[in-house]
Image (cartoon, grey):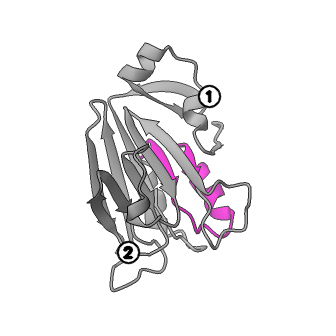
Amino acid sequence: MPVTRLVIPSEVEESLTISPLEKENRDVSVRAGLAYSLDMTKVLVIADTHNKLPPRILELAASADEIWHLGDVCEEWIVDELRALGPPVTLVRGNCDENYNWPLVCDLTRNGIRFRLEHICPPPRRAPADYDILLHGHTHVPRDETIAGVRFLNPGCVARPNRGAPPSIGWLEINKNGKVNWRLELLH
């Protein structure tokens, strides 16, 4: 059986030994403990599962290179289910999570793009210049907005959508040239 693991902050990148030139020219991820190079990284982005993991999420996650959970997992069995699928799982703690070993904020770099993951989004006037894209949950409402040069993305909510939004997840595709594609997928 392949080894699966929970990735907390940026263990994926820190666990690999590659030259600085290689790090600039390609993205590297880990699947079952082995490094491989990707021309594009496909990330399943979910938030606010609140103890619910619809079977459709597991089907979608099978085609992901990574899974990022933006908090309010609640019960840890959700993380176990996601880890069992194989892609590395990176998560941040939400206001409903009780595992204080999970980080509140996680900064990652993929193909030269700097990402910040956190559950509760800071006010837009506080968006620092040290990341390009901030991914957050908490509102249960999808978002794709650029403020002060920072792109704010929210995949919406898997379990309890808000303000008339349907349940949804996000797909983040990061090309090796640094181009980012964001796509919301509704869960019906």
The outermost residue toward the bottom is 164
Q: What residue do we see at 49% from left, 59% from top? A: 58
Frontmost residue, 167 versus 17: 17
- Is 127 rendered above or below residue 86? below
What kind of element bears circle 2?
Answer: loop
Give amino acid for label 1.
Answer: Ser
Residue 12, position as x, y percentages in the image: 56, 35
Q: Which residue reaches farthest front?
A: 125
The N terminus: image quadrant:
top right
Q: Give the side of residue 8 with respect to residue 150, left or right.
A: right
* Residue under numbered circle 1: 15
List x then y, in percent, for residue 161: 42, 80
Residue range corresponding to the magenta coloring: 64-91
Q: Residue drawn 43% across and 60% down?
A: 126
Disc 1 to disc 2, C-alpha distance: 34 Å
Which of the two discs, 1 and 2, labels the residue nearer the N terminus? Answer: 1
| On-image quarter of the C terminus | bottom left
Q: Are marks 1 and 2 in contact (CB under 8 Å)?
A: no
Q: Residues within 10 Å of mark 1 (few under 14, many from 20)?
A: few
For residue 79: magenta? yes
The residue singled out by tag 2 in the image is 141
| Quarter of image, res 154 | bottom left
> Residue 157, image x and y in percent?
44, 72
Residue name at image x 54 percent, y 32 percent:
30
**Callout 2 amino acid:** Val
Q: Is residue 119 magenta?
A: no
Residue 6 visible in the shown view: yes
Q: What is the secondary structure assignment of the residue under circle 1? A: loop
Sort mark 2 into few (<14), some (14-19) or many (20+) by Cα contacts within 10 Å. some
Report the front residue among 186 and 16: 16
